[in-house]
Every structure is written in C-alpha cells, then in structure tokens.
C-alpha cells in the first residue's frame, strides 16, 4: 500500500464512520417518534481490484470502506401481522361499542326502564280490579299506560339516534379512507422517484407504513409490495391503491333506521366508479359499523333492537285491546313503538268489569293485570330481548378483548424489531466514534510520514 493509497483508505473510513454516526444520530433523534423504524448504515470493503482514487496503486489488501446502503430495519411479515390483527380488533371493537351504546339506552334494570313501567301498568290494573268504582285508580291506569307508551317510544328513538350517528360515522370513515388512499398513492410516487434516483426513502416508507396500518384498521385491507418500492393496497382482492393511483369509496343506502329494511335499501359502501359495485370488507371498523346498520334480516344490531321494541309495543297493544271493550292503545302506522299512542284520553272510558255483573265487578281489570305473567306477555318479549343483548354484548366484548390482545402482541413484536434502543445506539455511536478517531490517526500518521519524506529527505547535516 502506497502512502497516498493509505490516505485514500483513511479518508474512506472517515466518510463511512461519519455517515454511520449520522444514521445513529437520526435514530436517537427519533427515539420517541411514533412509527419510526430504526436504520443501519451498511458498510462494505472496497475491493483491492478497484481504484479508490487517482493516487491508489491497486493494493492487494483493499482500498478502504464505503457505505453501500442505509437499511430500514423493518419486517414486512411483522407489518402484515400487525395489519391483520388490527383489522380484526377494529371490527370486534366497533361491534362491542355498538352493543355498549345500545345497552346504555336499554337502561335495565332500573326504576324507570321499560320493565318497571310495564310492572307499574299491570299493578294499576290490579288496583283497579280491587277498586273498580274509584276514579283515582282509573286515572292511575291512564297515566301508567302513557308512561309505558312513552318508555317504548323513547327507547325506539334512542336506537334510531344511535343508528343515525353510526351512519354519519361510517361516512366520515369512508372519507378518511379516501384521503388516506390518496396519501399512500402520493407517497408511492415519491418513494419510486427517490429509489430510482438512488436516494434514501426510509422516512417516506415509515410514513406510508403508518397510513397502511390505518387503512387496515378501517377496511381490513391487504398490501402487496412491488419491486420499484411502491405498494398496492387491496380490499377483499379489489385494488384501492395501485402505484400512484387511488380509487375512492362512498356510502349509499338508507338514511334512516326505518329505511333499512332489505338488501336493496341496506347501507352499503360502494366503489365510486361506473356501476358502483359493492365493496366488501375483511374486517376493519367500517365493516363492524355496517354490521350494526344492516337490516334485521342480516342480523343488524340496531335494526334488530328497534324491531324488538316494536314487538313489545305490538304485544302490549294487541293483548290489552283484546280484553278491554274499547282499544286502549292505537298502534298507528310505521314502527309500532314509535307511532303507538294511548287511544283513551278520558279516564272515565276505562272499563274495570262487565256492566251486567254489577258496579263492583273488576273482572276485566283483573284479566288485564294478569297479562304480565303470561308466557307470551310483553314483559316476556322484553326480558328475552334484554337478556339476548346482554349475553351477546358480553360475548362480543370478550371477542374484542381477545382480538386486542392479539393486536398488542403483534405490535410488541413489531416494536421489538423496529424501535430504537438508546443503549444499543449509544454503543454504536461510541464504536463509530472510535473508528473515526482511529482513521483520523492513520491519516495524521501518514501525513507525518509524507512530511518526513518530502521535506526532510536529503537535508542531512543541516
């Protein structure tokens, strides 16, 4: 190795170690940056058959070192696992939240829930059967009938409000998906351009990875990596993002709870293109919300709940009206729980017994009071519904907990492989620093040799 070749070797080491320290500094600077993936400077020896500089003599022992690449220490398999578990957890969480909200509107057991109002209604008829001539007991019957009707109407209205809110949330999520897909497409273009030009696109890839996880959380999407550095995003096999182009989605279908009655009117997410084909989802928050908005025939959480309110109202009106000489309740038109009214406006129109049996007969009132203990009573219909919601809600919540645990495990594995370890980076920084100092010392030593050779050779005796 010539002296000038030695300088070239030392210079290459200085450059390589400085670049490695810069990469380490980047890692340390982003230790708390969400979604950042640590990087590593890959070094390789320069072959002795190559020419490191104009002064190199092609020494057989090599011509120094250079940085071949700055690797992003991510794992596409761990990333895919995170996206998959996130999609499943988001779907289960969306359904669990829908049940939690629904349970809060049912408000059972309580002193002012539907069960309490029905019990009060039957008790008022029992009091009337014991005091058929008392005007006050008839007034209590009328007021308790109104309370039961209002409780059913309020419960149905709460479900309708939740349905409207969830549809609005679905529209917001779809808009967010469209925006995220456009951002991924733009990043694809930037990454491809950077890679082709020989630049470092690691930070852009980190940004895109975060967006891909968001898309999976919302839609259950999958990712396919391309050789040019771009990714294609698919929803149930249909492309959402291809290269630097993105498709868009939109929400169609019923705009109110009462409109979601069949497949034709169901709330759907469709592709925003000719024909508007329906987009299906393999998990994600949107899929969970659509399952709550679906018609009762498809197991929709909220439409099924509304239908149960209607069945309780229908059972109440039908069974009471069948025993009373004049209708006590009017079901109206439309959803029974929402449109049912108390048909009697004057308490004097309430009949306690059969007139032929005398003024003290309370047989009709007694028969109506016994409706509440029948197997097909409105109370039984309501209790069956409440128990079903409670059991299903608990099961859904447990499924969400299991899915979230799987997601946490996947995220932990991902973070273990990609996150910055300050202790490790500190050791790396010290290692590169010592190597830099050693290379500097080599350069200083060779410089002193050259000074001796050039400036002091031939001046013996001076």
Image: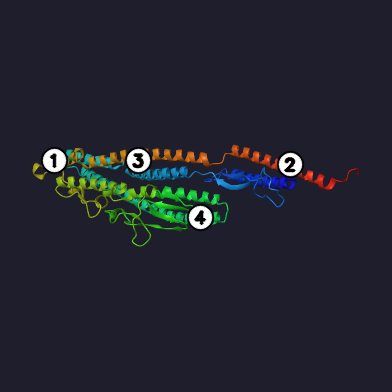
Task: Quickly name the residue at label 2.
Answer: 441
Between tags 4 and 1, which lies in front?
4
Residue 213 at x, y = what percent? 46, 48
Instruction: Depth check: give the residue in front, 384 or 239.
Output: 239
Does the residue at mark 2 contact the one at mark 3 (Cβ under 8 Å)? Answer: no
Does the residue at mark 3 contact the one at mark 1 (Cβ under 8 Å)? Answer: no
Task: Quickly name the residue at label 1.
Answer: 363
Task: Quickly name the residue at label 4.
Answer: 187
- How far apart marks 2 and 3 lie (CA) works out to 67 Å
Instruction: Depth check: give the residue in front, 172 or 241.
Output: 241
- How far apart marks 4 and 1 lie (CA) works out to 79 Å
Q: At 65% across and 41% down in the image, what residue appears?
A: 432
Look at the image and name its color scheme: rainbow
Residue 61 at x, y = what percent? 67, 42
- How far apart marks 3 and 1 lie (CA) works out to 47 Å
- How far apart marks 4 and 2 lie (CA) works out to 44 Å
Q: Which of marks 1 and 2 is nearer the N terminus?
A: 1
Which residue reaches farthest bottom? 274
Q: At 49% across and 49% down in the image, what residue appears?
A: 209
Q: Earlier in the sequence, mark 3 or mark 1?
A: 1
Q: Earlier in the sequence, mark 2 or mark 3?
A: 3
Q: Earlier in the sequence, mark 4 or mark 2?
A: 4
Judge left or right: residue 377 versus residue 98: left
**Mark 1 residue crowding within 10 angstroms, few (<14) / some (14–19) / many (20+):** some
Residue 109 visible in rendering = no
**Mark 2 residue crowding within 10 angstroms, few (<14) / some (14–19) / many (20+):** few
């Amino acid at each position: 190795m010539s002296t000038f070749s030695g300088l070239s070797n030392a210079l290459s080491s200085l450059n390589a170690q400085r670049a490695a320290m810069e990469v380490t500094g980047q890692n340390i600077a982003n230790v708390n940056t969400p979604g950042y993936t640590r990087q590593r400077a890959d070094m390789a020896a320069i072959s002795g058959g190559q020419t490191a500089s104009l002064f190199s003599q092609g020494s057989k022992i090599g011509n120094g070192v250079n940085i071949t690449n700055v690797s992003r220490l991510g794992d596409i398999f761990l990333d895919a696992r995170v996206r998959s578990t996130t999609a499943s957890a988001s779907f289960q969480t969306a359904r669990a939240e829908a049940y939690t909200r629904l349970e809060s509107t049912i408000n059972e057991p309580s002193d002012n829930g539907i069960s309490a109002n029905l019990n009060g209604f039957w008790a008022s008829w029992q009091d009337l059967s014991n005091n058929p001539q008392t005007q006050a007991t008839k007034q209590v019957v009328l007021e308790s009938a109104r309370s039961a009707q209002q409780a059913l109407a309020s419960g149905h209205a709460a479900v309708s409000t939740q349905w409207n809110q969830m549809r609005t949330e679905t529209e917001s999520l779809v808009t967010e998906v469209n925006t995220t897909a456009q951002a991924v497409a733009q990043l694809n273009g930037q990454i491809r351009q950077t890679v082709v030009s020989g630049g470092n696109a690691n930070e852009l890839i980190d940004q895109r990875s975060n967006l891909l996880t968001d898309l999976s959380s919302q839609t259950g999407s999958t990712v396919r990596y391309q050789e040019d550095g771009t990714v294609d995003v698919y929803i149930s096999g249909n492309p959402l993002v291809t290269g630097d182009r993105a498709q868009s989605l939109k929400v169609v279908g019923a705009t109110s709870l009462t409109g979601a009655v069949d497949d034709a009117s169901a709330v759907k997410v469709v592709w925003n293109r000719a024909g508007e084909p329906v987009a299906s989802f393999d998990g994600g928050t949107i899929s969970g919300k659509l399952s709550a908005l679906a018609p009762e025939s498809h197991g929709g959480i909220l439409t099924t709940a509304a239908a149960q309110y209607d069945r309780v109202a229908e059972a109440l009106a039908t069974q009471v009206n069948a025993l009373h000489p004049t209708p006590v309740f009017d079901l109206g038109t439309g959803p029974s729980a929402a449109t049912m009214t108390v048909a009697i406006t004057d308490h004097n129109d309430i009949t306690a017994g059969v007139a032929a049996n005398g003024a003290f007969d309370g047989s009709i009132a007694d028969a109506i009071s016994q409706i509440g203990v029948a197997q097909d009573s409105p109370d039984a219909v309501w209790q069956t519904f409440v128990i079903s919601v409670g059991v299903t809600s608990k099961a859904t919540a447990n499924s969400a907990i299991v899915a979230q645990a799987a997601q946490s495990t996947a995220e932990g594995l991902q973070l273990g492989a990609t996150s910055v370890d300050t202790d490790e980076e500190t050791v790396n920084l010290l290692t590169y620093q010592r190597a830099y100092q050693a290379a500097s010392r080599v350069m200083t030593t060779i410089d002193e040799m050259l000074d001796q050779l050039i400036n002091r050779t031939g001046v013996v005796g001076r």
